[in-house]
Amino acid sequence: MIKQTIRVLGALGLGLALVSDVVAGGGIAGTVTFTDGPQKRRTLKLAADPVCASKHTEAVKSEALLVGEGNAMQNVFVYVSKGLEGKTFDVPAEPAVLDQQGCLYAPRVMGVMAGQKIKILNNDGTLHNVHPKPKINKEFNLAMPKFMKVKEVSLDKPEVMIPVKCDVHPWMSGHIGVLTHPYHSVTGSVGTYNLADLPAGSYTLTAWHEVFGSKSQDVTVSDGGSVTADFAFALADLKKK
Amino acid sequence: MDEIPYDVKPHPVTGVYNAKLGIWLFLASEVMLFGALFSSYVLLRVGADTWPHGYDLLNVQLATLNTAVLIGSSVTVVMAWASLKLNDLSKAKVWLWLTVVLAGVFLVVKAFEYGAKFEHHISPATDNFYATYFTITGLHGLHVIGGIIAFLVLLIRGDKMWQDDSEHFTNRVECCGLYWHFVDLVWIFLFPTLYLL
Amino acid sequence: MQQEVYGYWLPLNVSAHGEVIDQLINVLHVFMLALFVGWGVFFIHCLIRYRSGANPTATYDPIKAKLSKYVEIFVVVFEAFLLVGLSMPVWSQFKADLPAESEAVEIHVMAEQFAWNVHYPGADGVFGRKAPQFVTPENLLGLDPDDTNGKDDFNSINNLHVPVNRPILIRLTSKDVIHSFKVPVLRLTQDAIPGQEIPFWFEATKTGGFDIACAQLCGLGHYRMRGQLNIQTQADFEAWLAEQVEEEDDGGFAF
Amino acid sequence: MSAEHDHHSEAHGHHEQSFVQKYVFSVDHKVIGIQYTISALFFLLFGFCLMMMMRWQLAYPGEALPLIGTWFSEANMPGGVMVPEFYNQLGAMHGTIMVFMGVVPLAVGGFGNYVLPLQIGAPDMAFPKLNMASFWVFLPGGVIMLASFFVEGGAAQSGWTSYAPLANIAPAGQTWWLVGMIFLITSSLLGSINFIVTTVQLRAEGLSYFRLPFFVWAQFVTSFLLLLAFPPLEAAGILQLMDRVAGTSFFLPAGLVITGQPLEVAGGGSPLLWQHLFWFLAHPEVYVLILPAMGIVSEIVANNTRRPLWGYRTLVYSVIFLGFMSFIVWAHHMFMTGMGTAMSTFFQATTMIISIPSVIILTALALSFHGGSIRFNTPMLFALTFIPMFAIGGLTGLPLGLTAADLHLHDTYYVIGHFHYVVAPGTVFALLAGIYYWFPKVTGRKMSEGLGKIHFWLSLIGMNVVFMPMFSIGMAGVSRRLYDQTQYAYGAQVQELTIIGSYGAWLLGVAQIFFIINLIKSIRGGEKVESDNPWQATTLEWATPTPPPHGNFTEVPKVYRDPYEYSVPGAKSDFTPQFSEEG
């Protein structure tokens, strides 16, 4: 009886400790740049499916490497790769959304928590099939004929990154990072990311890009503090990868 | 009309009892089974850019030993049948036990061969040479196990079967013997194909 | 327009070798129909004439059936004629007499689940080396980046452009499973087998746009593995090539 | 316990057999035959239901299946609309079920088991226990197949032909398919050994080979086909199982890229190896489907034309020749795989040659009607319809057997029309005829003629409405196995025909309700037969009591004459049975 009580109290204490950790934490933010500036992009062969072509008014270029103003690098997945072991976090009730728009994935790169619902949309009016090729998670191959506008799936084990393809439209390429924690972000058109409310501690932060691979740096977050960690990729990284 | 004719006695026209014809037919289908596997082997080998020589990768000595063991067991099973024909059950049982032991030796040697490969992380997935090697010898091994089971059944229930109907029992030994010769024969094809070529 | 191309029987033929095939198919069906109707008339006659009501006692002795013997012999001879006279010439022309590479337009087609990758050699007319390890979503053909022959190569997906009235030599491969390249208007089917490169050829005789289908079950998207065959005049084809080359070729690396 | 005691207790039934011994683990060929028949009919119905669902998707692609659409899981039919994966599962399983779990077990396991020992005057099959084993291997095989619908990723979905490499990389259901196939193949092998030994060893006195009823000949040749053609498929199954489970690459060449990811296997295999092994079985398999049907039809035609079959010996030689030739035509299924001229010429020639015995058989059957006194009862209606239906199926094989025409028709609906005419209104009609024909022997009651005729006419219309348009659809160029043919201009063009075909399929479904009602009603309430030989037939099965007891014959049968001695001039009646001493 007493033992049980102690256990319960202990659990409560731990829970409180965790909660307070989070509340009192700091953040990491930064910018990812591509030092060699914007590169030539291939034109995608959307004519392969007239439905896809009809969704766009001008030629669509590859989104594999998007470099914006000030060399801001888009679609880089930045996440805490070390330092959060053993901690558990609530899985968001909100599903992540992966849309298929004009035969392109939106977003092209996304992060979710293990077990989080992913809502896949198809408003293209053509057949897509969602075919992730995970190494750890279970592979599935889901046909979404034009009548099927929404489908929910989930990935249960942490894995960075899972390529996602549509076999009908071979240019369609996406990536999903699955983590056990919510501290991940994808850079937008200005190349910035922001990981807020991180518990104080030392972490390894990794930035991943589909063409140039990963780069990591160690950061220490203190309570209430905010750390800046920038990443830079260059053409030279291609050889290393 | 109750009894099935020619269950034990040979048919006057065909000259065989039912089970003997049955076992020959069964062996015909087995020939097609192994024939298909051998043909696949030939097709894969002909189509491959390079194909290793069995003697470079496999243990020829052990396989030679195994060949001898199997041929020996074919002899012992014939002896068992011959003893039964001479009405000597106890001698036949000795020969049958010997057959089982030899079959067991074959499997143990085979297990050592397999073990040596697995130790070096060689598996059927390594390449198509090993894929055919493991598949065909594995299937052959299953046939050996099947033979052992059949012989054990004959040994364990032998006394009673012999008492009930000695001719029927002799026939059973003959049929298992025919099967066993076939298993032997498959190995005699397997050995040069996989180990020596 | 559509109604003229496709219907309830053989669709429009736009290939040089298709005429003989159509002839074979039509002759064969007339033959089949004649045989079936002739046989059927006899059969129905028997059913009515020899129903038990009309013929209470059956005849034990078999009828002498000379005619049936002649019909059978005729069938044998006719089948031999079809085989030797009609089928084999087409097949050997299609299979054995591949046009010389110098006079044909050579195109590589690489099937995958669920699309047709079409590979053109670009301005130099030489195909770059392809290998599976180079395949990425941006390099669907798996062109070797170090092979200079491949620099000006370009690809299209599901769109096969060919000039009219010229022999087209296609080398067909597959990346993953077995597909089958089928163009009804060309009277053409050819399986794409992974690990093999299969050459075949045709010569289109009319311009226009037609469907390419996959004829071998290749997975859930099999039904949508649709390509477009664009048969163009030589001038249009060249203009299209130039357009593609321009877009593709500025010597630099692209993502 | 002495041997003698053993025999007595089994033979004379001094001890009452328990229910389980008598009806479940029975060694009596008749009970096993009935077990096969009932399970095969169930599987046939199941396979047919899969098809009726597919016909909805074909006719109205992307629309929710009415009434029952919502019964299925979200993964297979979200909102009642079929997804392509599920469509492919239905297609693959329809083929597998109909061929390996429906027609073969019914034709060989059912009719062969029940009728063959009776027709040769045997007390049972040569190996009763083996016979029981073969059924109890078959049933688990069937259950494994059906259960595979419930594994993750669903049942096999790479077509009934399971072509590698597609089948190699398919979800887990394919492994179940392979395991199920190994069970079904083993069952067929055991059965075929039993049939051959029985036919060779247990024929009644006086029953020489050329006095055998044609049905026995058909079963005999079929058994050889099963015996020799199935093992290569078993080998292929083992190899594919190894590929899937042990990571070998028998059917996988190096350098495969699946969905943009390289497949990590050793490579060096050949996708065409699977096709060779598969079709080496599967072409003889076509004759496994058709020969027993021809046998049944011949019995019924001879009986109901009241005259001997025309050219009995010719029929027998043709059947043997067919069986032999069926082993060397297999590659005509592979003309479009990049085959060279020499090989294709050989297989075209053998294919043309094999059509000749079929033509002879059809001619002989048709000539048998000439001079007959034809009774049009339900079994006869089904049996005689088999003949023109099989003729359509056979004739449409010709264009497919010629490579030049096959260039256009390969893998189109024309092929589907062709082989369905052979097996659906062909074989299945023959099997239905057989059920109507032998039902009185099995139960002592006749099936209702009225319901039987409704069943026949509706089935005949239904069958032709489904399959006849397929020739046109195929000619237009529509590939088979398309989830939605309207994606193609030429498919959309002939979509009306597909819709008509679907209504035909559903009509066929309605027709079978009459059959099921008839079957159930007649077992208890059918018109009782007065004699042991209600059709006034000549073959030995009608010499037994009705239904035949354990051991079949009350006295040892003896055969005095040819099998179809109907309307012999000068005889007392219009039939002189083989077992009758008279004359």
Image (cartoon, helix red, strand yellow):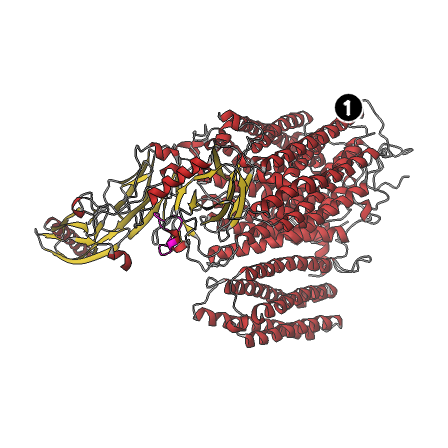
Residue A90 drawn in magenta: no
Q: Is residue C20 above or below residue B120?
A: above
User: Viewed as shown, does residue D356 lie left or right of A80?
Assistant: right
Tell me the SS state at disc 1. helix
Please determine whether, in this image, residue D443 is positioned above or below residue C3: below
Q: Position of residue D363 (x, y in %)?
A: 76, 35
Task: Determine if the magenta segment contains residue C138.
Answer: yes
Classify residue A110 by image quadrant.
top left
In front: A211, or A222?
Answer: A211
In this rendering, the count of numbered labels is 1
Determine the residue located farthest toward the left in the rendered image.
A224
Query: At label 1, which amino acid type do we have?
Result: Ile
Q: Quadrant of the C terminus of chain D?
A: top right
- Residue situated furthest top in the rendering: C54
* Residue D6 visible at all: yes
Q: Is residue D39 above or below residue D569?
A: below
Q: Kindly identify which residue carries mark 1.
A: C48
Q: Going by the image, does C136 lie left or right of D20?
A: left
**Can the viewer see residue D21?**
no
Q: Position of residue B166 (x, y in %)?
A: 73, 66
Q: Nearer the viewer, residue C56 or C47?
A: C47
The x and y percentages for residue C27 are: 67, 32
The N terminus of chain D: image quadrant: bottom right
Q: Which is the main secondary structure of the residues drawn in magenta?
A: loop
Instruction: Report the residue at 23% width, 43% height from top.
Output: A92
Left or right: residue D75 compared with residue D555: left
- Between D29 and C157, the one lying in front of the other is C157
- Magenta-colored span: C134-148
Q: Is residue C172 above or below residue D417?
A: below
Q: Chain of mark 1?
A: C
Q: Position of residue D56 (x, y in %)?
A: 49, 30
